[in-house]
Amino acid sequence: MWSMVLAQVSGFRFQDSGRFFQALLLLLAVSLSASAQMRQSDELLLPGTAEASGVVVRASSEAEAREVLFLTLKMHAKVCEMLCLTSKPPSAISWYTDTNAWKNFSRQSDARIEGKGLSGGSTIAILSDNSDAHESLAHELVHHVLKHSSPAPLPLWYEEGCAASYGWCTAKWLGQMEGRNLIRTQPALPKSELLAFEVLLGCKDYPALATANAAYSRQSEELVRFLETRLGPANFQKLGRLLAGDQNLHNCLMDNFNFSEEDWDVLKRAVYVRSTTKQER
Ligand SMILES: [Zn+2]
């Protein structure tokens, strides 16, 4: 197909603007059809589809798609309840069990993918290659709910910390409903890999290095948990609303929650305590 295009392009004179635009249109049509073919082949790897309540789930079989759809609707409702927020469920979930298909998808995706999940626009994609896939789905659902219920972008640490903390709580809740007791083991983070407090608060994108990304997620979660315990659930939700307007955490805490500089120092230390393996159930 490309040789046909090149033959057409080489035959025209640049002064002939009509033919120039014809060639451009042809090139555009070919590239669009190539990307459509990529999407088609991507979907062929996910042949099972299930749909309910406006959510389309694609997975490797219809039975799996139905199961993921059920999990999604259940966990989405739980996330909304825990965060006291309302949002529609995501419009589509792609559930990958094949690592190569996931790699293909990751290469085609415009967004940076952290770990085994992606939440972008109104869709979620998950790599389900081991037992923590339910936690990955819950984690991405928290990102989805926060993005779609907040009037303005939230600080990345807040979103990531909530996704890590509430995602785990949601997966644990689901496990208990199904008679399984989940255990989460987080490996120790060497002190040398921990991010400086100002870096943690200022990140606008996930760190590129996997080790720095792991530290970013853990430290953000510690910060969220500290704040939730210190402020209480209602004030923690109020903090989320305030941060969507002004992302400066120091100002938000000082102006609205009677924080002192001593309190601020205690908070800073809270994100540096996890240099040992942590296990939760
Ligand atoms: Zn995340």
Image (tube, helix red, strand yellow):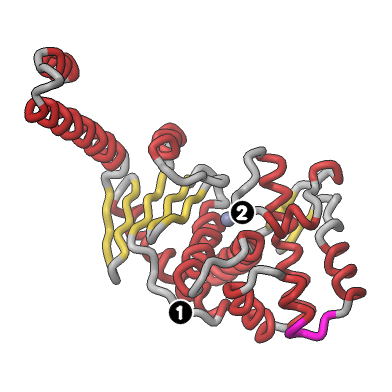
Q: Nearer the viewer, residue 203 or 144?
A: 203
> What type is the residue that disc 1 sits on?
Thr
Q: Is residue 237 above or below residue 143?
A: below
* Residue at x 7%, y 30% (from the top left corner): 18
Determine which residue is flagged by label 2.
Answer: 204
Residue 172 showing in the rendered view:
no
Residue 248 showing in the rendered view:
yes
Query: Is 128 situated left or right of 196 in this image?
Result: left
Q: Is residue 215 above or below residue 102?
A: below
Q: Secondary structure at mark 1?
A: loop
Query: Is 231 situated left or right of 242 in this image?
Result: right
Residue 77 place in picture, x, y as percent = 46, 75
* Residue at x 80%, y 43% (from the top left corner): 193
Residue 126 place in picture, x, y as percent = 46, 49
Residue 214 place in picture, x, y as percent = 69, 47
Residues under numbered marks 2 and 1 in contact, where contact means CB atoms less than 8 Å apart: no
Determine which residue is flagged by label 1.
Answer: 86
- Residue segment shown in magenta: 255-259
Q: Quadrant of ligand 1?
A: bottom right
Q: Nearer the viewer, residue 273 or 171?
A: 273
